[in-house]
Image (cartoon, rainbow, N blue to C red):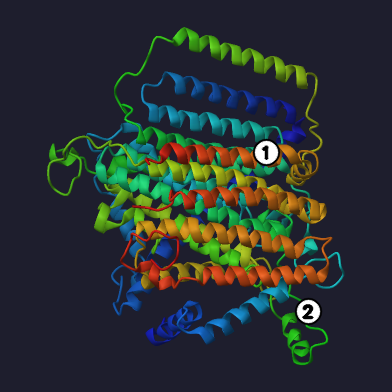
Amino acid sequence: MSGVVDLIGAVALIGLIKVVVVFVALLLTAALVTYMERKVIADMQARVGPNRWGPFGLLQAIADGIKLFFKEDFRPAAADRWTYAIAPAAAMVPSFLAIAVVPLGDHVTVGDRRVDFVIADINIGILYFLAMGSLGVYGVVLAGWASGSKYPLLGGVRSTAQLISYEIALGLSLVPIAMVAGSLSLSDIVAAQAGTVGNVTFFDGIPVLEQLQDIFSIVPNWYIWSQWPAFAIFFVAGIAETNRAPFDLPEAETELIAGYHTEYSGIRFAMFYLGEYIHVVVLSAVAVSLFFGGWHGPGLGILPWLWPLLWFLAKTLVVVYLIIWLRATLPRLRYDRLMWLGWKRLIPAALLWIVVTATVNTEGVSRNIRLAVFVVLAGLILAWVGRGDPRLAFAVNPQSGDDRGSA
Amino acid sequence: MPDSGVFEYLAAGLRGAVSRTNALPNCAFCVLVFGLSATLSYPRGSPRSCSHIATSGAVPAVPRDYFSQYITIGIFVLVGLGLVGVTLQLARLVRPNVPTREKYTTYESGIDPIGRGWTQTNVRYYIFALLFVIFDVEAVFLFPWAIVFERLGTQAFIEMLIFIAILAFALLYAIRKKMLEWL
Amino acid sequence: MSAETWQQVVFWIFALLITGAGVLVVTTRNVIHAALWLVGALMGAAAMYVLLFAEFVAWVQVLVYVGAIVVLMLFGLMLTRAPIGSAEFDNNQRPLAALCAAAVFVVTSVILIGAFEGQEINFARTAGTSTESIGTAIFSSYVWPFEVVSILLLAALVGAVVIARRD
């Protein structure tokens, strides 16, 4: 009787501590990322960037937050009261909830209790992540509708269509990972990427390549090596899911003022803004867990629990840096090109890649047939994706009747 | 901090790798990447062990306690919602409130708003939403298949191939009917 | 309190939430608000699935119903000329609707009680229904329904395309 209450009490206490620590760490990381983005882009554009508050401008994010906190926050008379009020929370909450299933580090043992560095290690972490992504749509659609204004409505509907289109590609790109890992739990997927690739026998009997395959004994066993097409699809779709450049059409200021959050001000606007950066951090964390070995990495003997956390943070920031780099490099896509890329390139490519992964890994088919199928399918995918020059995606003529890349 | 010269170089390399204009580096790059990919994803060692399947269907070292995970998620949801609510209420206490009539009008690039904000949207959005439902259901069926396909072997593979083929046909149909052309 | 009692408490909390949200779906004057209350009811149902150890079904519920089907409904509402926001769109078919709802409730209850009466969840087995068993069941016992689902989805798409095309 009391044993169960004790158990639930202990679970609740540990859960609460984990939740508060992760929450604070996530908010700090997101604030750091807003600063990092401005600094990195400023550097790429030969500017200085924020340098007023704190050393190197490090306190800029906090200054911005305080400013928005003290700004007047008013609701337009035409807005729908309750929907307008809950939309910022609906945008922000799912984006940080998704971190719950990401393993941030190894475990520690407190007394006789094992404490994993993950908020909730549920069996179907991938589905949980996707479900949180699909809940994130509501922040956009509600903000757009509730404002009772034309630009937010257009921006909201348009970006909802964008989000749901890329959500499919995102979901399909995770299926091959589930196939090779044999599990939907992010902890299992990270555990499967421990160690190095090990001995590769693929080139046995071929003179030079036989020696070269020894190199794999020091290469970490990450899924990115064999699943790089899945990563490419995941990364592109993920950037579109977070509304980041070059897919930041929801707030295309040349067309839509500020899209779905045109009518928002003060702390509610800050929530949309912070939600976007939290989403970027969480997406990078998931990408690291799925493709880059999660928290695995070499560590020293002292403080063995600390090194995985540092590795995880470092890898996550590298992926965040890639996303920022893309923003500084690429112009915004036009809306029809966005839909073209999502529906006619990413989704078919993801389906094909699932078939290829299944073919290579299904038992009961002979070795040579499987290799032949792999090579033929890989060649076909390559020929098809490489058919159009991607730079022509930015070409001028929109009225191309066919679905080719060259418009 | 990034050096623009290095960035230029990297960007040029990436562009060369994907564009058609540089046929030779393009082919070399693809052969290299696909060779590596094929090498690593191909089954090696004993016939039962596929590339990364060593942990397939693995039982975790410590069995997960189902309810404690969901209790923690519940706590996360409550703490998150609570913090958002507290922040909003705190901001309400400290921020100024100076209502003027103009402030509460709908924003329309500085002119007085014309008509109502809630207008009819394009039917195309509905088609995209419908396609989304269809492919979402497909993805949901793919996940349980993905973690058992290896054990069920060729039979499940063919079943899923038929399923994917029918839905790929649906996508092809929508493309041919020009439902996915924007404008 | 024992774990079963906790489960009962949580069950009744969510049951009340679902019922409240369901009543608000049909009584609210604003169709968008109705859709949002429906989201609340569906999320409550997902929590119920979690409580019944069916976590896969729970997250599929969130992913497909909340994430896709209600979004489809919202798009449908936004593209019609439905008086979003203010006007009345009540009609005189309330008794008929109440009768239908009651009939559906009775039939579903009878079927469910008949099918599962007396069965209890084995609380000792806290591993949850694994996704593996769902996959195995679909691809060995329920192959035909599974393939028919794809045809059904195809038919839905073709129907929508035919309706939406102008020519």
Can you identify the residue that label 1 sits on? C148
A265 vs A78: above or below = below
Q: Which chain's residue wears label 1?
A: C
- Binning the other alpha carbons within 10 Å of mark 2 as few (below 14), some (14 to 19) or many (20 upward) gives some
Q: Residue at x 72, y 85 (%)?
A: A215
- The nearer-to-camera label among 2 and 1 is 1
SS at badge 1: helix
Q: x, y percentage for residue C32?
A: 39, 31
Q: Which chain's residue wears label 2?
A: A
Q: Residue furthest top?
A: C95
Q: Quadrant of residue A63?
A: bottom left
A113 vs C55: above or below = below
Residue B105 placement, left or right of A145: left
* Residue A9 seen in this snapshot: no
SS at badge 2: loop
Q: Residue furthest bottom?
A: A208
Q: Given the image, on which type of amino acid does mark 1 rest?
A: Val
Can you identify the residue that label 2 sits on? A202
